[in-house]
Amino acid sequence: MRVLVTGGAGYIGSHAVLSLLGAGHDVLIVDSFATSSPRVIKRLEALSGRVLHVIERDVRDYEAMRGVMASWVPEAVIHFAGLKSVAESVADPALYYDVNVGGTVSLLRAMAEIDCSKIVFSSSATVYGTPEYLPYDEAHPTNPVNPYGRTKLVVEQLLGDWIGAREGRAVTALRYFNPVGAHPSGEIGEDPSGVPNNLMPYIAQVAVGRRPHLTIFGDDYETRDGTGERDYIHVMDLAEAHVAALMHLATGERMQIFNVGTGQGITVREMVRAFEETAGVRVPTEIAARRAGDLPRFFADAARARDMLGWMPSRDLHDMCLDAWGWQSRNPGGYDAQEDAA
Ligand code: UFG
């Protein structure tokens, strides 16, 4: 299929591009490179053995997106482009609504110009909010507790309205749990700018010597060992879920929503231990107060994706740690610390 991938140079987008190319799809990446590195592109080309189509544009730029649509004429769009820091969304909600909601509005308007009617959207488990029961299934009430989560829910609602407006439109929204790990080559991976917000990149940066210790945010939760429990999903499994989601768009279902997780909760301490064992490196930790806004524990009921998409995660905790470490140890300073010698 001819696919336009927004945010295709980002962490999840770049891994998904590899899976899409591997499955035989034709891909155009549209990325502003505001939160990703252009160096990703060369790595993707080396890994895939293909010359990539890439356009540097901001999805909020409607006129630019019209031009892109008119020249590429995608059969479907996979929409990754967006901002994802909960803390930043609290500090600057207008920015998050502008990029995440405004960007989608601009994209959908540009798609309408060429009658492109299929989209896969990157949503988040954060739309559920405080669990009323666990595991979260897709029918769990949605009540996000921060602006970031609300932008994801608003876009899901927008997409629900969008499909109703014209025959033949189809949406698959994937609610990601906690993506971690990297491509097994260690050539692409997660490269947050500044201090990582998320657990796995933080652990990896401690392991590689960039930071002295991991701060564990709270050890007094009602979990197995007192630390926060999450459903971590290998980014390559998540990437493959997008290939399945793309195929699902053709089934005639108008709007489908799927959890993408493993269904298994892992605590912070369990993750640290698994990483230490896999990498053979010590990761010193210090306990601090709970982080504002953190939930004690949540994990997915992923049965729907299995039953309807035919997708199942195949990588385990060891693979997640091994590949996160492979990326971090080969690229200790991330993409932009590397010399592009070639
Ligand atoms: N944690 C630490 N120390 C750190 C970072 C995280 O102890 O330095 C703990 C957190 O307290 C939490 C767990 O590790 O218990 C996971 O934290 P992450 O920040 O990696 O992930 P979150 O579940 O908080 O957030 C992620 C995404 C959000 C998304 C949310 C729900 O980053 O964008 O999942 O889907 F909103």
Image: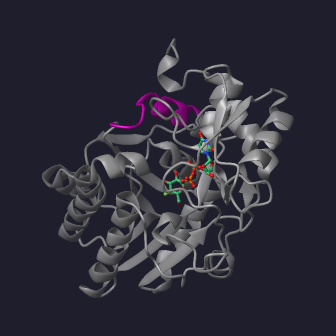
Up the image or down, 130 lies above or below 165; here it is: above
Q: Position of residue 188 (x, y in %)?
A: 58, 35
Specify whether residue 76 is in view.
no
Q: Residue 40: within the magenta?
A: yes
Picture quadrant where residue 314 is located: bottom right
Q: Position of residue 227 (x, y in %)?
A: 71, 52
Task: State the residue at coordinates (80%, 27%).
Answer: 282
Task: State the residue at coordinates (68%, 82%).
Answer: 307
Q: Position of residue 9 (x, y in %)?
A: 44, 41
Of 101 and 202, the residue lying toward us:
202
Left or right of 229 on screen, residue 84: left
Residues in magenta, as a range: 34-46
Q: Main secondary structure of the magenta part?
A: helix
Specify whether residue 20 is in view.
yes
Task: State the residue at coordinates (67%, 54%).
Answer: 228
Of 264 and 41, the residue lying toward us:
264
Up the image or down, 284 lies above or below 312; here it is: above
Picture quadrant where residue 297 is located: bottom right
Up the image or down, 266 lies above or below 245; here it is: above
Up the image or down, 298 lies above or below 227; here it is: below
Q: Position of residue 202 (x, y in %)?
A: 61, 35
Q: How many marks?
A: 0
Say how the picture is coloured: one colour
Of 86 and 125, the residue lying toward us:
86
